[in-house]
Amino acid sequence: MGRKLLLEKAHVEGIRTYEVYRREGGYASVEKALKTMSPDQVTEEVKKSGLRGRGGAGFPAGMKWSFLAKPEGVPRYLVCNADESEPGTFKDRYLMEFIPHLLIEGLIVASYALGSNRTYIYIRGEYAWIVDILETAIAEANANGWLGKNIFGSGFDLQIYVQRGAGAYICGEETALIESLEGKRGNPRIKPPFPAVKGVWDCPTVVNNVETLAAVVPIINLGGEEYAKIGVGKSTGTKLISACGNINKPGVYEIDMTISVEEFIYSDEYCGGIPNGKRLKACIPGGSSVPILPANLLFKTAKGDTRIMNYESLSDGGFATGTMMGSGGFIVLDEDQCVVRHTLTLARFYRHESCGQCSPCREGTGWMEKILKNIETGKGKMSDIDLLWDIQRKIEGNTICPLGDAAAWPVAAALRHFRDEFEWHVLNPVESQQRNFGLAHYADPRPVPATA
Amino acid sequence: MAEEKKLFKVTIDNITIDVEPGTSILNAARMIGGDVAPPAMCYYSKLKGSGGKCRTCLVEVAAGSTADPRPMPKLVASCRTNVMDGMIVKNITSERVIDARNGVVEFLLLNHPLDCPICDQAGECHLQDLSYDHGKEGTRYEFGRRTFEKHDLGPYIQLHMTRCILCYRCVFTADQLTNKRVHGVLDRGDHAEIATYIEKSLDNDFIGNVIDVCPVGALTDKTFRFKNRVWFLKPVDAHRDCPKCSGKVTLWNRGDEVFRVTARKDQWGEVNDWICNECRFEKKATSDWVIEGPTQVSRQSVISQGHYVGLHKPKETLVEVLDGQKPRLLMDIHDVSEVNKPTVDLSKIAGPAHSDDFK
Ligand SMILES: Cc1cc2nc3c(=O)[nH]c(=O)nc-3n(C[C@H](O)[C@H](O)[C@H](O)COP(=O)(O)O)c2cc1C
Ligand code: SF4
Ligand code: SF4
Ligand code: FES
């Protein structure tokens, strides 16, 4: 059984309340940080921990904090990104819903390190009931002296505000989030300047994911070095994975990034295998934006190594034969799933969520959706497949924000690995409307290139 | 001795130029001029915050600077990326740029109605120019083009949303020039549109400038709607004493009639001085204005047809032809023949002489 740092206490009766949370050892990291450490020491511990951003990009959190500009007399802000709207990802929701004080605790320590006196939680509009949970937790923290002026005589003031979004995936992109937080239309900003220099109200700002900020708590409690011993390589600590799709036990799991993908899907401790004795066809291990992999590239890398649930191993092979850890939205597809249909679903999502600022994303996402719809409904042409490839290629890398890439990658990966399924749809317009392509050869072992 | 200002050396398409720190790649390229300057559909030097959106100005940075000569992995928007000392940029010398730009033009035209024959912007439309320069014949798009519910923006400004490329210039203009912005971008993605939320007319003073900044025919002058094609009109620079704006405009005339008033534009199609609504919409008589002379029109522009600006006069060759002899008698045929009225001064006729001029 892997080590749990975030969700260990998530099922203690009443842990949502301050009383129980505190009784279970909560807010110890705040005491430790504010009473015995300087802000820079906190940042140093986070650096040592090797913690990588859990929002998707995996950028080292401590490094991000140390980039924060600190001009004299200008306020700095910490913003917690709780917009969680990536299809397949629902880990932050779980954390905030079941153990909200963990996030508040992490926010206090992180705000102290960064010198933020006003910290915001920007939460996805659809998570309406969680706003209440968080506000209750903030009120309890205030009442018990963990927030407010001169917290425990440390001279540090802090207030936390929850801001609800209005239901836009793009507002999870950090600069769109900042715009929306300021009350404007949620369009991503053109970078540079980066938020570390000009963020909320043009002041230096750090935006971090919910899970990233919650992880600060065990890092301070254990010490950065201890934390870094969990996991392997540059994948330190524990990671929340939200698993869904064709598995027996969908849900949120905390893993220590040393278990294999195969074990994660089949062990009873985690996903518990695939229902009805079906076979695995494909998997998207990190949320809808990361490349889909066929079964025969999922458990073993192209080199023949066992694939592990961590940043390095999942991306082994680059985009040609690998994928990404992303935000940890683990989607499993069994042999009855149609990759064309699935890709269409994602393309529809990105078309719908594009902010429309830049031409490649605004126009390209809609175009891809229309072509995919034709292929899926038996009206496609062979040339459509190459056209799709060309469109995604012309979006990727040419847009303002990574949503363009996120829209292009799923299409590219589906075409790369499942091209014959697309061709089958085109060549069998009638049959493809009656049955699925099935597993085909997607689980057949791949020849492993001989190593010298 | 005054401290010498350090200039940055930047090389764009193999041409090196020294520019002030803080200059964008696009503006550096414009200083070089010609084909080196990337096309810009959304950037507008006079509008703060503009640029970065259309992606037509993408360039390749082959070397970031002398200090860090690594290439930038992605193409960058030249309008929003500043030069560094020793930077090497490739615009039309980069195959990646040409490829990406073709893609962007295709995207911009994807849902465009191609209704140039009935569009008042035709002839001065930046999307038309861009398509001629970078577009392909035909389209790979086989679906219906998007349409929008029509919004009425009042008596001055006509909106054709289907032509809009969402450059946001009109939004910045309303923010930065008028006392209150009443229009903006509603909705998102490919259904994003320019509109007022509740049917409102756009009539704040200076709002007329959105017509001039709009690179396409999405916002046109309603008082000029379907009145004439721009290439049949003769642009002349004129001014008046205006208490609100510079009063420096271009009149678009045919004969004596003023069809349209616009701000004057520079070689990049940008307005020099903003003008007020009164100058633009209400002053439609030649007598309202002091005429300065014909407007300089780029030779590449269709508007230059029929205009004789920058005419190259042949030198006086009569003496040469006559072997050094002076002509004994010179007659002005217009004075002598009574065919046309000698009282009409030919040099004062707007455009080529016409029988009407001698009625
Ligand atoms: C379209 C888009 C949506 C995003 N949505 C989220 C989100 O819902 N939650 C999140 O934490 N990060 C999201 N991100 C990533 C953020 O921009 C940012 O990288 C992240 O919040 C940084 O936090 P981290 O360093 O702790 O991971 C999104 C990025 C993009 C481009
Ligand atoms: S890539 Fe898409 S979502 Fe991002 S700024 Fe451009 S249009 Fe908006
Ligand atoms: S209406 Fe014209 S100026 Fe306004 S966003 Fe559209 S194209 Fe740009
Ligand atoms: S002009 Fe640079 S992106 Fe539009």
Image: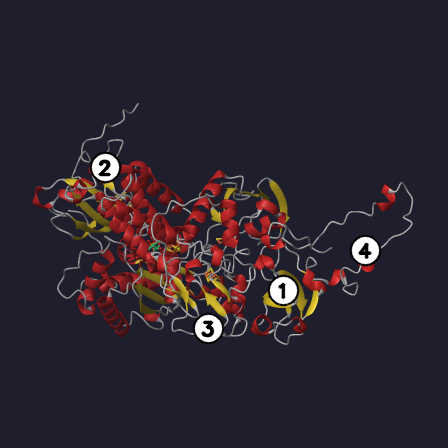
From the viewer's side, name the closer residue of B308 and B5: B308
- Local crowd size for mark 1, using a 10 Å CA cut-off: few (<14), some (14–19), many (≥20): many
| Residue B333's disc number | 4
Q: Label 2 to label 3, Cα distance in Å?
A: 53 Å
Q: Is mark 4 within 8 Å of ligand 3?
A: no
Q: Is mark 2 within 8 Å of ligand 2?
A: no
Q: Label 2 to label 4, Cα distance in Å?
A: 79 Å
- Left or right for A35, reference A433: right
Counting from the top left corner in percent of width and height, residue A20 is at: 17, 66
Ligand 2 - quadrant of the structure image: bottom left
Judging from the image, mark 1 belongs to the subunit labelled B
| Residue B154's disc number | 3
Specify the color scheme. Answer: secondary structure
Tell if the residue under mark 2 belongs to the same chain as the one under mark 3. no
| Residue kind at label 3, given as amino acid type | Gly
Counting from the top left corner in percent of width and height, residue A360 is at: 40, 50
| Residue kind at label 4, given as amino acid type | Ile
